Amino acid sequence: MLKCRTVWKKLAPLARASSNVCRQNVRRTGLTNGRIPAHVPAAHMSTGPAGGGRENQLYILLVGATFLGGGVYAYRTVKGDQQRYQERIDEISSRPHRVATQVPAAPILSEPPAAEATEKETVPEPEPEAAPSPEEPSPPAPDTEVVAPSETTEPPPEPSPPSEPSPAEVIEPPPAELAEAPPIELIEPPPAELAEAPPIELIEPPPAELAEAPPAELTELSPAPVVESEPTAAAESPAAEPPESQPEVVAESGVDIVPASLKVPSHTPYLLIGGGTASFAAARSIRARDPGAKVLIVTDEPDLPYMRPPLSKELWFSDDPTVTETLRFKQWNGKERSIYFQPASFYIPPEELESAENGGVAVLTGRKVVHMDVRGNKVKLDNDTEISYDKCLIATGGMPRNLQVIERAGEEVMEKTTLFRKIEDFKSLDKVSRNINSITIIGGGFLGSELACALGRRSNESGLEVIQMYPEKGNMGKVLPEYLSNWTTEKVKSEGVKVISEALVKSVTCKDDKLEIQLKDGRLVKTDHIVAAVGLEPNVDLAKSAGLEVDSDFGGFRVNAELQARSNIWVAGDAACFYDIRLGRRRVEHHDHAVVSGRLAGENMTGANKPYWHQSMFWSDLGPDVGYEAIGIVDSSLPTVGVFAKATAKDTPKAATEKSGTGIRSESETEDTATSPVASSTPAPAMVQHKDDYGKGVIFYLRDKVVVGIILWNVFNRMPIARKIIKDGEEHADLNEVAKLFNIHED
């Protein structure tokens, strides 16, 4: 009884609704026909509508069946996906174990073919030559592991290992099928499988190209397209493959692209481009202000940061026959040191830079920055590795210039020509000078004169003929006044150098293994080797990609007073064209400027915001007995005033290094400042003297009666005084009185 009542409560609303629908249908029919039918039996009203009601019920049944079928289908689909997903997870987790147990010889091969790798996992025999066939060459083993999931997700799994296809299955799919594999991997596999998807790009070469390569070539050296694409895969997914496979690729391929891509940090707070003096000074300055800073130096040279001046000075006067290997030298004061700023233990490996708790300085050698994305704050190396940065310093230095007549002369002449700049240039020239009879140095500037004196002194022992030629009338003719240039020329000749002045090279040819230099005035010079020391060209290769401005007059990157080219990019050293608040826009190519500008750039990279006001100095030594230091604009075309005195045994480069304790005199001078120099009470002689009395003195360079440059000739440790005179910018009525500030008349 209770059940019937419950059923009636549920069916009664349906019955009433059906009756209402029936009445409405009858009423519509009556209105349409113009009359109301009177013979409709009342008993039919309770049995349901005779017309449209059955269609509504059928519609409801169809919709319900559709929903029910869809639910069943969705349930079965989800259940099947879960089952396949679990099977895939189990297969992935067991794969490293199977590779380690079934394929013990696999790590020996640098790049095993895919078919061989799959065969080792399915067949118990480990021999790689079990099934050599023309279709066997295919992408490396990691790629077959990527292709396998696309096949296991489409057909149902087999009782045998489901993820390992046969060699034929790897080769058969067309390129279109291979291209569709990555989307499948992105939908179903876990994140670990997503890391394996990029190597599918290795399959892009046409199948014919892969089929032509014989199996033997794959075991010795992989084809070039595959080797080039491997570093990308390694960089994108370093943890996707077993760890023991990557070192074996490095060992067998013989290419250091892979290890470089693995060792280079992807991001560094401070990136310094260039491994010279400016970069090292900046790194030291950054670490001084930010002890926990992480600094990465990228240099295209194979050496750690080193100082360049000894390459043309002290190293040539060393008595050590292994100096080209040790690169250690005795300074003029007898103390020994290395040309490297710091030993290798001072730096940390690049791969440990990101994880270093206290930061440090890392040097990536042998790599060149070829592209700079200023907006993205990242650079690209010559092996396509990208490094992002927060702040960047460009200290790319410069490249030695060459004469166009030598460049046009051909390879035979170029092979007998040295452009002196780096350590390998010093080693090469030292070796060449010991095995030839004559050598010619073209150039009368700082570098040319230093090398001429160094090689000239060696000529006294070995009989080497040393020739120096230049277009000026005398040595250092563009810097020194004429009378002092002539005196320097005689000094160079006394070192055993044959000097040819006012020499303009017309052509260079090679005949009978000898170089013939034809001058424009008709003179002919025969020699075995040429050293071109004709200046430096600032390295601004990154200007185009970075969108940085290059100065059209002086060359180099144009920077502001804080050495900034952009808000987070600084430039220092030879490549920087800066504005001197006292002397105008300049570009300086000397060691001291690299030290000072690098230090300032490092300070500003850590938030100092200091302007460049320091007047850098430079120096040159014509052997251990004659040396000079200069500051400001020293141009022989400017009016000059020289005050000289007789030199003593203390007035030599040896005395300078004895007091400073370093062969790089600027390192001690750049920290000093002059406040109130006390003039000497000794009366000064006349300003014009005999040339034999040019033992020591001071040369003032004037512009609009104001001192803009000073040379201290065999006068050392007085640079702060000269710097203050130029900084004051005052007009002096009697420069003889100003010379007393340097105490040159005191013994």
Image (cartoon, grey):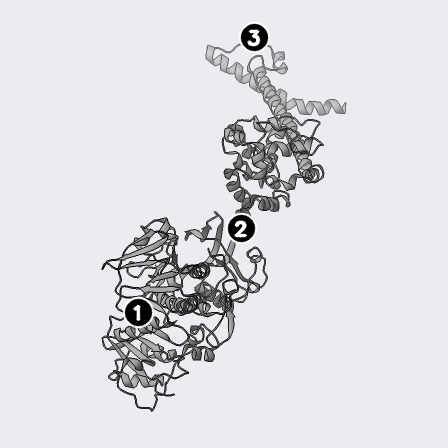
Which of these two is toward me, 78 or 524? 524
Residue denoted by label 1: 475
Q: Which mark is residue 260?
A: 2
Residue type for callout 1: Asn
**In-front residue for pair 454/189:** 454
Q: Identify whether 152 is placed above or below 452.
A: above
- Find residue 39 and name its label: 3
Q: CA distance from mark 3 to mark 2?
A: 100 Å
Marker disc for residue 385? none
Secondary-structure class at tag 2 = helix
Residue 596 in view here: no
> Disc count in the image?
3
190 left or right of 273 in image? right
Which of label 3 and label 2 is nearer to you?
Answer: 2
Residue at the spot x=46%, y=12% of the render?
32
Give residue 699's position: percent from left, percent from top: 30, 78
Mark toward the start of the polypeptide (3 vs 2): 3
Mark toward the viewer: 1 or 3? 1
**Which secondary structure lies at badge 1?**
loop
Q: Is residue 523 left or right of residue 338?
A: left
User: Around disc 3, counting alpha carbons within 10 Å, would you say few (fewer than 14), some (14 to 19), or many (20 or more)?
Assistant: few
Distance from the alpha carbon under mark 1 to that under mark 3: 137 Å
**Residue most extreme to the top:** 39
The amino acid type, in three-letter code, at marker 3 is His
Query: Which sits in the foreground, 692 or 696?
Result: 692
Vertical placement of 675 versus 456: above or below?
A: below
Q: CA distance from mark 1 to mark 2?
A: 46 Å
Mark 1 or mark 3: which comes first in sequence? 3
Asked whether disc 1 touches disc 2, contact meaning CB atoms under 8 Å apart, the reply is no
